Image (spheres, rainbow, N blue to C red):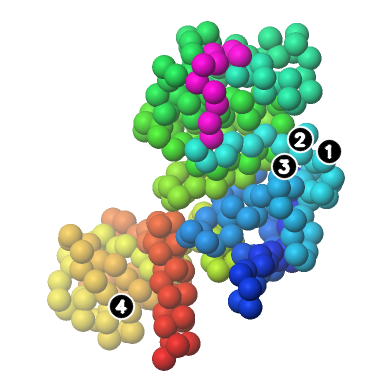
């Protein structure tokens, strides 16, 4: 799988006011995004997400490190021809129609008029706005404006999509449709980097996620890797009595009784198997045994709180 976005040792410092230290927005981040991958960029305000996107777009330059899009350094203007970008809170003149807006974006991307004319109805159908092609944007809802913005980012069939809050203001059905559209784009080989505060959307949409914290990559991996708790399991069995619970605890397992089942914290898989053997030796019947997973929000909050605790400890 070809790498279409590559960031290596990226640092960015901004000069502060007179006699004050420089502000470090990025402090040596590294990640790669492959062809056809849906990649999420998460982090609290000030973590460096926007700075990263600006560097990829050539809107600002890194202090140190390198960044490349489609194999081209981001300082090379040719790299930007291959990128579609949807900024947060984008504005399109509301006196334009959807057709006119897409025509302008197509021409700015170097497309010829005939190709633009063919692509407009296809794109508007894909974002569920085919019936609004000649309606002025001032009549659009916020969700419709988001859909049109996504179509504008895709007009020139880019290899890479950089999307900042693409489902902002979109209703639940629309969010599902946008997720399906992005997955379809990825299946066709388009690389998508998604920046969003809606953690549930990232969790449902992305293949891999990078969590930025204080300008560094605090966590990187697939959603499954980041949310899996390999040593915690839900056990549904009968009977569950105090004798069984006490026996499990004596073995060193953590046990919580929750709504008729148990949540077990164990040392490893062998420990878990020993608990199952105990259950069966007592005549118990096991009906469910599944790993307990965190949500991406749990992982995100834990990382941020860990940083807050570290900061407090450093000042005590």
* Distance CA(mark 4)–CA(mark 1): 57 Å
Give the residue pinned by disc 4.
Answer: 254
The x and y percentages for residue 287 are 28, 56
The label nearer to you, 2 versus 3, is 2
Residue 247's spot in the image, x, y percent?
Answer: 24, 81
* Left or right, residue 70 beside residue 17: right
Picture residue at 37% right of the left edge, 31% below the top: 171
Magenta residue span: 90-100
Q: Which mark is residue 97?
A: none
- Residue labelled with disc 1: 78
Q: CA distance from mark 1 to mark 2?
A: 7 Å
Number of residues whose C-alpha sits closer than 10 Å to that of mark 2, classed few (under 14), some (14–19) or many (20 or more): some
On the image, the x and y values in percent for residue 307 come to 47, 75
Which residue is under mark 2?
A: 82
Asked whether 90 or 21 is in front, the reply is 21
Q: Secondary structure at mark 2?
A: helix
Cα distance, mark 4 to mark 2?
52 Å
Which residue bears the numbered disc 3? Answer: 35
Foreground pick, 283 / 38:
38
CB under 8 Å between callouts 1 and 2? yes
**Front tag of 1 and 2:** 1
């Amino acid at each position: 799988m070809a790498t279409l976005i590559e960031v290596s040792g990226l640092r960015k410092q901004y000069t502060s006011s007179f006699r004050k230290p420089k502000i470090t927005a990025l402090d040596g981040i590294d990640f790669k995004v492959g062809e056809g991958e849906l990649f999420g960029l998460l982090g609290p305000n000030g973590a460096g997400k926007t700075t990263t996107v600006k560097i990829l777009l050539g809107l600002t330059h890194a202090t140190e490190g390198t960044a490349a899009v489609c194999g081209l350094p981001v300082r090379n203007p040719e790299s930007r021809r291959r990128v579609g970008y949807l900024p947060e809170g984008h504005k399109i003149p509301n006196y334009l129609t959807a057709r006119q807006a897409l025509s302008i974006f197509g021409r700015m991307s170097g497309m010829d008029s005939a190709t633009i004319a063919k692509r407009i109805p296809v794109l508007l159908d894909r974002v569920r706005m085919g019936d609004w092609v000649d309606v002025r944007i001032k009549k659009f809802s916020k969700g419709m404006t988001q859909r049109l913005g996504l179509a504008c980012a895709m007009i020139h069939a880019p290899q890479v999509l950089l999307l900042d809050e693409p489902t902002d203001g979109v209703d639940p059905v629309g969010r599902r449709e946008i997720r399906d559209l992005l997955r379809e784009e990825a299946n066709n080989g388009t690389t998508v980097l998604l920046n969003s505060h809606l953690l549930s959307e990232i969790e449902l949409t992305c293949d891999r996620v990078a969590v930025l914290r204080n300008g560094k990559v605090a966590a990187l991996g697939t959603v499954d890797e980041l949310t899996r708790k390999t040593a915690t399991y839900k056990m549904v069995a009968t009977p569950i009595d105090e004798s069984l619970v006490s026996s499990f605890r004596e073995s060193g397992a953590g046990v919580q009784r929750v709504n008729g089942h148990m949540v077990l914290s164990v040392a490893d898989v062998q420990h878990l198997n020993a608990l199952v053997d105990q259950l069966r030796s007592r005549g118990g019947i096991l009906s469910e045994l599944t790993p307990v997973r965190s949500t991406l929000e749990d992982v995100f909050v834990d990382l941020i709180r860990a940083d807050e605790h570290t900061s407090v400890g450093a000042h005590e």
